[in-house]
Amino acid sequence: MSSYADSWLKFEESLGGVRPVLKGSAEELRDQFRGFGSLLASQAPPFPENKLKISDGEVGGIAYRAYTPLNSEAKNLPIGVFFHSGGFVVGNLDSEDGCCRYIALKANVVIAFKNAEAIGGNHSNIFTIGTSAGGALALAVARKVILGQTNLPTDAITGVVALCPVAFHPRNVPAKFRSKHSSYQDNKTTYL
């Protein structure tokens, strides 16, 4: 078994030497995840509130949050649609709020989708992004758009950022589709 990075061990030490482990019912896991998220957020650098316009809304019963850089000179910014982590069970809008703020500020993009033009975004320049379960959703949504299974143009997706996505090994791809699933081979020398 490989050892843990010194930075992680220092973080555990700051927690009193405890390694976080989530267990219990879905509701108990959600509570624990929120608590752990609050702890992590307390370690993050503060974000200047006057640099982003942040607005919450709902579309079709699904909550969303939009992050728009205020000081951007550019118009029609790329739109990042972020899918949070949490194993399809425990994440929410707040669990990766800091991450979305950071991306919107540093990459000069709008993180949202609904009414893209109204918030300074370009609906023909969309990338999906997500972590873990959210990474799997980022891949799945991009695929749906590219296959023409949404009301977006099939070329609207200009990129995918899948951070440690829940995915599957190429051996599990049916033989007739393997030629379209070559990233393991194509990126075999790519650094993580």
Image (cartoon, grey):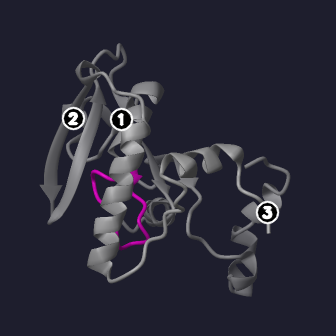
Question: Local crowd at mark 3 within 10 Å, few (<14), some, or many (≥20)?
Answer: few
- For the image, the number of numbered tags is 3
**Which residue is tagged 3?**
2
Find the distance from the CA under tag 2 to the CA under tag 1. 9 Å
**Which residue is tagged 1?**
101
What range is drawn magenta here? 82-95
Residue 112 position, x and y percent, is 30, 44
Q: Do the numbered discs 2 and 1 sit on residues whose CB atoms are within 8 Å?
A: yes
The first of marks 2 and 1 along the sequence is 2
In depth, the one of 160 and 24 nearer the eye is 24
Residue 41 in magenta? no
Judge from the rendering whether residue 178 lies leftward or rightward of residue 124; answer left or right: right
**Which residue is tagged 2?**
54
Task: From this view, report whether residue 142 is shown above or below residue 9.
Answer: below
Q: Residue at x 46, y 54 (%)?
A: 130
Q: Do the numbered discs 1 and 3 sit on residues whose CB atoms are within 8 Å?
A: no
The amino acid at mark 3 is: Ser
Local SS, label 2: strand
Question: Residue 91 is drawn in which quadrant?
Answer: bottom left
The amino acid at mark 2 is: Ile
The first of marks 1 and 3 along the sequence is 3
The first of marks 2 and 3 along the sequence is 3
Find the distance from the CA under tag 1 to the CA under tag 3. 33 Å
Q: Residue most toward the right?
A: 189
In depth, the one of 170 and 47 nearer the eye is 47
Task: From this view, report whether residue 18 is shown above or below residue 55.
Answer: below
Residue 66 position, x and y percent, is 25, 41
Question: Local crowd at mark 1 within 10 Å, few (<14), some, or many (≥20)?
Answer: many
Question: Residue 4 is drawn in which quadrant?
Answer: bottom right
Look at the image and tell me whether residue 124 can be seen: no
In depth, the one of 146 and 121 nearer the eye is 121
Residue 94 in magenta? yes
